[in-house]
Amino acid sequence: MLRFIVRRLLQLIPTLGGLSILLFVWLQRLPGGPEYALLPDDATAEQRAALRRSLGLDEPLAVQYLTFLRRIVQGDLGTSLQTSRPVLDEFFLRFPATFELAVTAMLIAVTLGLPLGYLAARKRGTVLDFAAVGGSLLGICTPVFFLAFILKVVFAENLGLFPSAFRLSPGLSRTDITGFVVLDGLMTREWDVVTDALAHLVLPGLALASIPLAVITRMTRASVLEVMGEDYVRTANAKGLHRTTVRTRHVLRNALLPVVTAVGLLAGSLFAGAVLTESVFAFPGIGSFVYAATQTRDYPVLTGFILLIATMYVFINLLVDISYSLLDPRVRAQ
Amino acid sequence: MSSSTPLLAVDELSVVFHRKGHGETRAVDGVSFSLEEGRVTGLVGESGCGKSVTSLALMGLLPERGVKVGGSAVMRLSDEGEDLVEADLLKVSQRRMRDLRGTQLAMIFQDPLSSLNPVVPIGVQVTEILKRHRGMRGAAARKEAADLLYRVGIPDPTRRLNEYPHQLSGGMRQRALIAMAVACKPRLMIADEPTTALDVTIQAQILELLKDLVTEEGTALLMITHDLGVVAGLCDDINVLYAGRAVETAERGPLFADPTHPYTVGLLGSIPRLDAPRGEPLTPVRGSVNDNIAWADGCAFAPRCDHYTMECLQGPPQLVRMADGESGSPGGAGHVHRCVNPISHADVVDRAVLESPAVAGDDEEERG
């Protein structure tokens, strides 16, 4: 198991290396540059060229890349062109919010999707099944920003059930330990902070959960249907086991295997989906910052953030693979 | 075992599948037979004759939707005291059936790999049945599970308890499934082609094991197979099925010595023979199981039969009991066939073959 983990971590090096080269080439290919975003419209060509030179953007791409690599080895991802603060600081300032949002969305998707998919399979062909299948189709088709907007208008602005923006209500004092509001609140027992932060997570969490929820529901349904027809389920029934034993130990345990893989893949897409959701709910995560960085061609922020998220993604999938091998002994053996 | 009622009496069992847009399929069309303790009864026939569906119907394992089961299958559940407790397996509630499965009747399936849960250790798959029906827990259950595995011939059973199905060989897997089936000493065991997925040497060992269980525990075994070698070696009574109906029923001796139904004769004639001259082609039953007509119109086998006459197509043929003198062997009284033009004294299997060790199944001494 340890060898497996080490091998997977070593795979990070070529993955991130390749990704960083792609990012360098792609980003520089984008029309425009920071000299247009950072300088006023009436700046002269000389002023723009001077800015490019001061940022080192006039050097050949290969030289820029080597400089980037030399810095990254020292743990330096560069400085944001917008804020003039280190990219790493900017990331860790915003990442906890996005992480909380992504975890909320995944929790919603899993806790609703698994039972829904399971019930749809058990009650195949009934109204419940059609509702689950149709609903998940709708969930996959609805653009996240549109759903986020609808949720905000209906539940925040019209019904006033949940706050419509930010991570916390203004004026609420909190102790910052980790940057994760809910976690901090739990640690310091500031219950008002915890409930307020959770209330702020509900609507963006639901919006972001729509696609993973739909995928998990459908995967669970298909997987349970398949497993219910397996010979070993017949054997379990032939042994006269209780219905619940058959359903949990024999059906669910096997049906969950493909769903676990899907959860890992979906976790990565959550960070991408977060950009849209965060902008609708003015949620102070990485999403809105990355969006702004794209507008201003903030190359260090774009490169750094994308590499950090890619690293996260690799770690999440490592966790998924480890849990998978715990669930399926056939994988463990190899 | 002195009781006059059989352990299981299956009477006019029928299974009809309804599928939307496909009409109905009569998979089993009025099959009757009875099982006795300590005896092996064979259900023989080619694919699609209804033998597996019969076993699933008895176990109550057919899907609930789109299936209609008719007839009765009365099982004697206990003969302690004077009171006879009986239950019709086809009519008891789902809940009651779950209590009966595993304790009164158990089943062994065809493909041992797919019949075991791949992600649950063998030990759990054996102990769960002990927990369910015998209320055993923890160490006691594990010890009993190890004993069961040992009894069915799995070496080093304590280590095997922690292993998963993919770590066992095909023969070991089938032994493990047999261990689960016999865990609560059921009085009736159904084996649905238990050796089909195994190679020949393992087949012989598994059949040996089943035979021992029948003789030692007095279990009744319903053996479902298409393999006449298995039938000859193991079964005491044989029912030959065709298109959902029994076409010939007899004890082993009379059936092999004196088959009367042309289908049985065809099956026996298609067995490869070691003593046949080199290069001589096998003689299969021509056509396929799909070339049949509805039993209501006549004999379903008629389109494939070499002996059919117009008489065969005038309504369903009835089961006919053979007169004592007609059958060549003793015990011929129970010899029944469903044919209007039976074959008499077919020369398909001579006595020498029937009594050879490979067929008669007394190869225990050789393997010793």
Image (cartoon, rainbow, N blue to C red):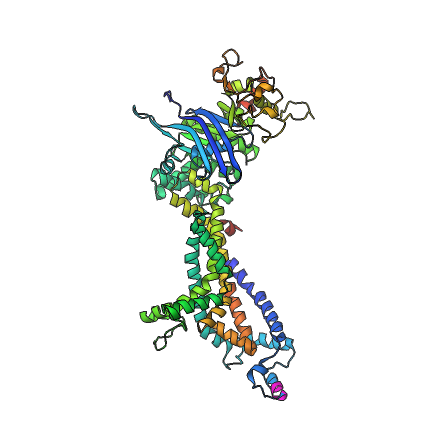
Q: Residue at the right extreme?
A: B279
The residue depicted at 47 percent of the width and 17 percent of the height is B334
Span of residues in magenta:
A45-50
User: Taking B345 as reference, is A78 above or below it?
Assistant: below
| B4 relative position to B345: left or right | left
In which quadrant of the rendered view does residue B180 lie? top left
Q: Position of residue B211 (x, y in %)?
A: 47, 27
Q: Nearer the viewer, residue B182 or A19?
A: A19
The residue depicted at 37 percent of the width and 68 percent of the height is A159
Q: Is residue B60 magenta?
A: no
Q: Position of residue B133 (x, y in %)?
A: 36, 38
Q: Position of residue A195 (x, y in %)?
A: 34, 68
Q: Nearer the viewer, residue A195 or B185?
A: A195
Q: Is residue A315 visible?
A: no
User: Taking A132 as reference, is B219 above or below it?
Assistant: above
Number of numbered discs: 0
Q: Nearer the viewer, residue A39 or B30?
A: B30
User: Taking A309 as reference, is B120 above or below it?
Assistant: above
Task: Locate the N terminus of chain B and report the quarter of the image it occupies.
Answer: top left
User: Taking B125 as reference, is B103 above or below it?
Assistant: above
Q: Main secondary structure of the magenta part?
A: helix
Q: Is residue A47 magenta?
A: yes
Q: Position of residue A75 (x, y in %)?
A: 52, 74
Q: Is residue A71 visible?
A: yes
Q: Residue at the top extreme?
A: B325
